[in-house]
């Protein structure tokens, strides 16, 4: 998934840096800004017990599948052929209807927004309504429900007519957006551990959990996730509320992150680090983030000994960025910094 700050391409860098700093190879690994769940999933496959969290529901659902579940549920009330039988029903092209997504996010709808082709929007509507109907009829367990919603979100994201975020849709159709929506079976890893997931503010959750390694991947710039990924949240919540503005936003006043605000980010980080009950803290941040490197080192040094690893990394860009922004670097690289702190207080 294209997601601001997605660490999929940095997992090996994080893993080898942890080994260089002698971070234990087992125990409880907390991924408190989980996003796509890529970090939790990776360290789950290494055998750690995972605690994962994020503010957003679409992220909670991704973590449900990638982190919490250890096996694929049976879907026994829908099909004798498990998830494959369910996919035969949901991937049937005849399952299509003009509904909420069509009306709000397709050119044929009332608002003429171009997030999905008319055909894909109608497929998304029918599939999401079918999942909800099965759940209301008690034909799906909560595990099964979240697996199906996750598969739909993933498939919808694949054919979305955006470049990077849902902050805007493209005026010209990208080729992927014209492909047909197709749900795919996710791979579920089993670490034989009782993994836990939450949808809470990290600074609140931290008071109630303990672990060995606390991994922090907070937002590092002013782009709030809620408005930038609102279509995914709409698909996750499915409350069919009235949307507003040019891009069909939800009200996100209760989803604003302090980490995206220059005046609050460093206080929030300090608070989090001081409340943490763990042996190691690992922080990912990049050199263009709103908290300076000096400030980060000051905060982290107040709880332990800090080691720093640096990796050049390709910038996350959207089309809008290309038009309007001016970057510090001439090339397309930023530096990803990984701070590993052995807690000593
Ligand atoms: C840089 S992204 C994490 C990316 C993730 N590591 C991945 O690989 O996909 C930051 C995440 O933090 C979440 N977030 C922002 N503020 C938060 C807060 N105060 N508490 C919990 N999650 C928060 C955002 O919703 C976003 O998903």
Image (spheres, rainbow, N blue to C red):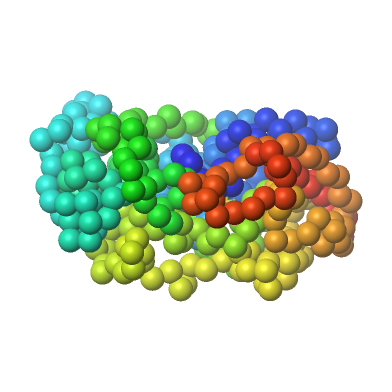
Q: Is residue 327 above or below residue 240?
A: above
Q: Is residue 48 above or below residue 132?
A: above
User: As rendered, which of 144 and 272 lies closer to the eye?
Assistant: 272
Residue appearing at x 73%, y 67% in the figure: 266
Determine if residue 263 is in view. yes
Residue in view at x 82 percent, y 62 percent: 295
Visible in this render: residue 153? no
Number of labelled discs?
A: 0
Q: Residue at x 65, y 45 (%)?
A: 29
x%, y% of residue 55? 50, 60
Query: Residue 177 versus residue 97: which sits nearer the camera?
Result: 177
Ligand 1's quadrant is bottom right
Quadrant position of residue 46: top right
Tell me where residue 102 appears, x and y as whole percent.
19, 52
Give coordinates of residue 91: x percent, y percent: 20, 32
Q: Quadrant of residue 265?
A: bottom right
Compared with 339, 10 (above or below) is above
The C terminus - image quarter: bottom right
Identify the residue at horizontal 49%, vertical 31% (top origin).
Answer: 189
* Camera-side residue of 178 and 18: 178
Q: Residue 184 location, x and y as percent?
A: 33, 31
Q: Nearer the viewer, residue 35 or 148?
A: 35
Left or right position of 160 against 328:
left
Q: Which image quadrant for residue 117?
A: top left
């Amino acid at each position: 998934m294209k997601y601001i700050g997605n660490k999929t391409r940095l997992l090996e860098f994080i893993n080898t840096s942890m080994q260089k700093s002698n971070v234990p190879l087992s125990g409880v690994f907390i991924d408190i800004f989980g996003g796509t769940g890529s970090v939790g999933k990776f360290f789950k496959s290494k055998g750690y017990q995972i605690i994962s969290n994020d503010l957003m529901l679409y992220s909670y659902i991704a973590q449900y599948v990638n982190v919490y579940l250890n096996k694929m549920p049976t879907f026994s009330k829908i099909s004798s052929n498990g998830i494959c039988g369910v996919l035969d029903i949901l991937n049937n092209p005849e399952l299509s209807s003009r509904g909420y997504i069509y009306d709000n996010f397709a050119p044929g709808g009332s608002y003429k927004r171009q997030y999905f082709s008319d055909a894909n929007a109608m497929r998304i509507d029918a599939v999401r309504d079918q999942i909800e109907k099965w759940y209301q009829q008690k034909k799906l367990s909560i595990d099964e429900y979240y697996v199906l919603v996750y598969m739909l979100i993933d498939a919808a994201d694949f054919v979305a007519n955006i470049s990077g975020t849902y902050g805007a849709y493209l005026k010209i159709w990208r080729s992927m957006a014209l492909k047909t929506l197709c749900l795919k079976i996710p791979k579920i890893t089993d670490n034989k551990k009782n993994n836990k997931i939450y949808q809470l503010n990290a600074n609140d959750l931290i008071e109630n959990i303990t672990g060995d390694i606390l991994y922090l991947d907070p937002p590092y710039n002013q782009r709030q996730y809620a408005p930038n990924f609102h279509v995914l949240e709409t698909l996750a919540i499915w409350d069919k509320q009235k949307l507003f503005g040019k891009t069909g936003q939800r009200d996100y006043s209760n989803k604003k992150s302090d980490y995206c605000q220059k005046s609050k980010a460093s206080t929030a980080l300090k608070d989090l680090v001081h409340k943490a009950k763990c042996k190691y803290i690992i922080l990912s941040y990049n050199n263009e983030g709103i908290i300076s490197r000096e400030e980060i080192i000051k905060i982290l040094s107040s709880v332990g000994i800090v080691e720093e690893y640096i990796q050049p990394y390709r910038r996350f860009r959207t089309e809008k960025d290309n038009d309007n922004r001016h970057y510090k670097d001439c090339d397309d690289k930023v530096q990803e910094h990984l701070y590993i702190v052995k807690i000593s207080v």
